[in-house]
Image (cartoon, rainbow, N blue to C red):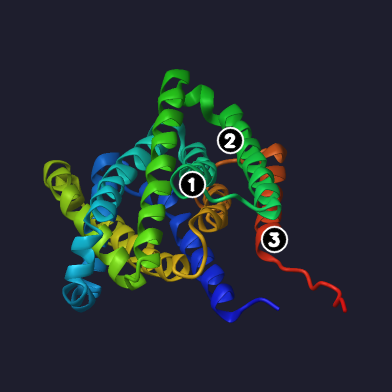
Amino acid sequence: MVPKEYAWGVIAILFSATVWGTTGTAATFAPDVSAAAIGAAAMGVGGIGQALWAARGIVRSRKALWDQRLLLVFGAVAVMIYPLAFYGSMRMAGVTVGTVVTIGSAPLLSALIEYVLDRTLLTLRWSIGAVVGVVGIVLICIAENASHGAAIGGDYVLLGVLLGLIGGLTYALYSWTARRMMLGGTQSSVAMGATFGLGGLLLLPVLIMTGAPFFASWSNAAVGVYMAAVPMFLGYIAFGYGLARVAASMATVLTLLEPVIAALLAVIIVGERLPSLGWAGVVLVVGSLAIITLRFPRKSRR
């Protein structure tokens, strides 16, 4: 039987992945706003919102946070870099390609971080699920690149893929640092609020320099408010809740749902066409989630 805490943690992370999957489509409604501005607004304002939400806990835990300052700083720097790389990747390589490269690389990079720093051996179930999920996102990426890569330009696609890998690394890194802080006794809301609040402060100069287009129209402003309030504020509060109950490597695999949501929204709302190869990738990603999350009952033994 699946423990309730684990189950709620999985549900929380899947909710996060779902709302994160909407960001690429939402960004298309503000084409005049640069990727740096969108990333800075989303993670910067959303991160500061998380810090304010957890302000009392952060004040009470200030000594523990000081003792964990190296983890906090590394996590905050990763939070600062992540949105710039992620949204830059989507602008250069396309919504789906940028999303699947970033999120698809995160589980493997997270596993590598845990192996190198924690000496954690991964289970066979996790490995199978991760491989199936990564194969799925590769198929989505190939299908989307074949359909739209020529229109975007090969050099931009390659640069977008590189930025996506940087995004995946920083995503895996701040997930690991936040998880380590929680295992060290820091409450999940405090760990996430402090990490994203500090990262948000680091992003404020970027937002000040690039954020003027948000005030050019109501649609641009609405995109900025949505990105900060829903995917980044609510999404990361739920992610922090789940991360306290699920290992970082497991959490990053669960977020493979994000590129599936991104691909579906790109087809339904943006009007992109997903070839049959891409739909096969969607099925594999969903299958990977089932493999790593469903626990099958074992026959009792004497």
Q: Verify CB contact (< 8 Å) between mark 2 and mark 3.
A: no
For the point 43% across and 65% down, the residue is 239
227 or 7: nearer the viewer: 7
The answer to whether residue 38 is visible is no
Q: Circle 2 — which element?
A: helix
Cα gap from disc 2 to disc 1, whole angstroms: 20 Å
Q: Where is residue 72 in the image (x, y as percent from the top left)?
A: 26, 55
Q: Verify CB contact (< 8 Å) between mark 2 and mark 1.
A: no
Cα gap from disc 3 to disc 1, whole angstroms: 20 Å
The amino acid marked with disc number 2 is: Cys
For label 2, the residue is: 141
The amino acid marked with disc number 3 is: Ala
Q: Where is residue 86 in the image (x, y as percent from the top left)?
A: 38, 41
Q: Is residue 101 above or below residue 44?
A: above
Q: Where is residue 57 in the image (x, y as percent from the top left)?
A: 23, 77
For label 1, the residue is: 110
For marks 3 and 1, the one nearer the N-term is: 1
The amino acid marked with disc number 1 is: Ser
